[in-house]
Amino acid sequence: MVAKKGSKAKGKSAPKRWVCRHCNYIYSEQLGEPHNGIKPGTAFEDLPDTYVCPVFALDVSITRDLGKVGKEGFEPILF
């Protein structure tokens, strides 16, 4: 597999995991979310615009209080 130009910044690789700022759920590109129809290897950027944090999607009380947390509620984990 050839890395795309610009995929590495200052010797660090592009983020492969993203964390929900509200509940700390981690989306792993390597694992995906097969139980939600997202195949392993799916890049965070390739998730549908309708993607929501699965923790928030399952807990009605959280959704009621904070609304749906979509992709904008996640930040990359850089390592």
Image (cartoon, rainbow, N blue to C red):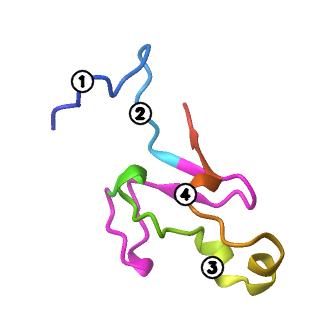
| SS assignment at label 1 | loop
Inter-mark Cα distance, 2 to 4: 17 Å
Q: Residues within 10 Å of mark 3 (few under 14, many from 20)?
A: some
Which residue lies under the disc numbered 4? 71
Q: CA distance from mark 2 to mark 3?
A: 27 Å
Is 32 included in the stretch rendered in magenta?
Answer: yes
Instruction: Please tell me which of labels 3 and 1 falls first in the chain.
Output: 1
Magenta stretch, main secondary structure class: loop
**Vertical side of 30 occupied by 15: above or below:** above
Q: Splitting the image into 4 quarters, where does residue 66 fall? A: bottom right
The mark tally for this picture is: 4
Percent coordinates x, y for residue 63 in the rendering: 74, 77
Report the span colored magenta.
18-41
Q: Nearer the viewer, residue 25 or 60?
A: 60
Nearer to us of marks 4 and 1 is: 4
The residue tagged 1 is: 5
- Quarter the N terminus occupies: top left
Kindly check if marks 2 and 4 are in contact, taking CB atoms under 8 A apart as contact.
no
State which quarter of the image contains the C terminus.
top right
Where disc 4 sits, the SS reads helix
Q: Which badge, 2 or 4, is on the more N-terminal residue?
A: 2
Label drawn at residue 57: 3
From the viewer's perspective, tell me whether residue 29 is left or right of residue 25.
left
**Residue 65 sits inside the magenta stretch:** no
State the mark number for residue 72.
Answer: none
Task: Indicate the amino acid at tag 3.
Answer: Ala
| Amino acid at pointer 2 | Ala
What residue do we see at 44% from left, 63% from top? 49
Q: Residues within 10 Å of mark 2 (few under 14, many from 20)?
A: some
Q: Residue furthest top?
A: 10
61 displayed left or right of 48: right
